[in-house]
Amino acid sequence: MKTIIIEDKERVEEIISRCEICYVGITDLEGDPYVIPMNFGYQDGVIYLHSGPTGSSIDMLNKNNKVCITFSIDHELVFQHPQVACSYRMKAKSVICRGKVGFIEDLDEKRQALDIIMKHYIDREFIYSDPAVKNVKIWEIPIDQVSAKEYAVPHYKQ
């Protein structure tokens, strides 16, 4: 089985669009890795996340706003020989994005970002009250680097 690098932007975006959550890697205040699963929205090379207005993640991002975000789909355990443990592998497709978090403060821009996030999960429109919008932290991450791979691809065409 081999790993294939995915370079086509449409295939990369298709993987992102099929994910229900993403995993966001942050550096904690002691310099250690910290990874959290999050809901997200994606549009035009930008990932949008939301959280409470304060907390440990916000403290970490205020110190170091660099993040690594991972998306993964189509997980399936495959093998070359059922009796050989080393021949087993998880078949999957993944995208890894790197960027820097900026926080959106403008209420109208926050509403637009919330619409992008919600559109990822449900096809309807929402109205957001001012208190709700003021009490949410919107993370905006323009993608600086992206890599994508497909794992456990057979060496032969079936």
Image (tube, rainbow, N blue to C red):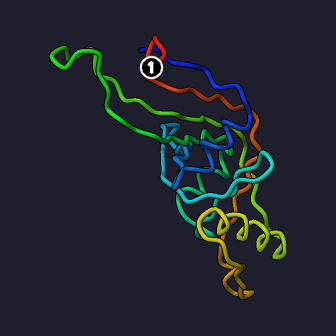
**Quarter holding residue 145:** top right
At 49% from the left and 38% from the top, the residue drawn is 33
Residue at the extreme top of the image, as rendered? 155
Q: Is residue 128 above or below residue 79?
A: below
At 65% from the left and 28% from the top, the residue drawn is 147
- Callout 1: SS: loop
At 70% from the left and 25% from the top, the residue drawn is 7
Q: Give the x, y percent position of residue 56.
A: 52, 58
Please tell me how crowded label 1 is: few (under 14), some (14-19), or many (20+) other residues with Cα within 10 Å.
few
Q: Is residue 121 above or below residue 20?
A: below
Camera-side residue: 12 or 139? 12
Quarter of the picture holding the N terminus: top left
Q: Pointer 1: what residue?
A: 158
Q: Give the x, y percent position of residue 116.
A: 72, 64
Residue at the extreme left of the image, as rendered? 83
**Numbered label tally:** 1
Camera-side residue: 53 or 87? 87
Give, as a three-letter code, the residue at label 1. Gln
Q: Give the x, y percent position of residue 112.
A: 79, 69
Quarter of the picture holding the C terminus: top left
Q: Give the x, y percent position of residue 50.
A: 63, 64
Q: Tell me: 152 left or right of 42.
A: left
At 74% from the left and 40% from the top, the residue drawn is 143
Q: Tell me: 32 left or right of 43.
A: left
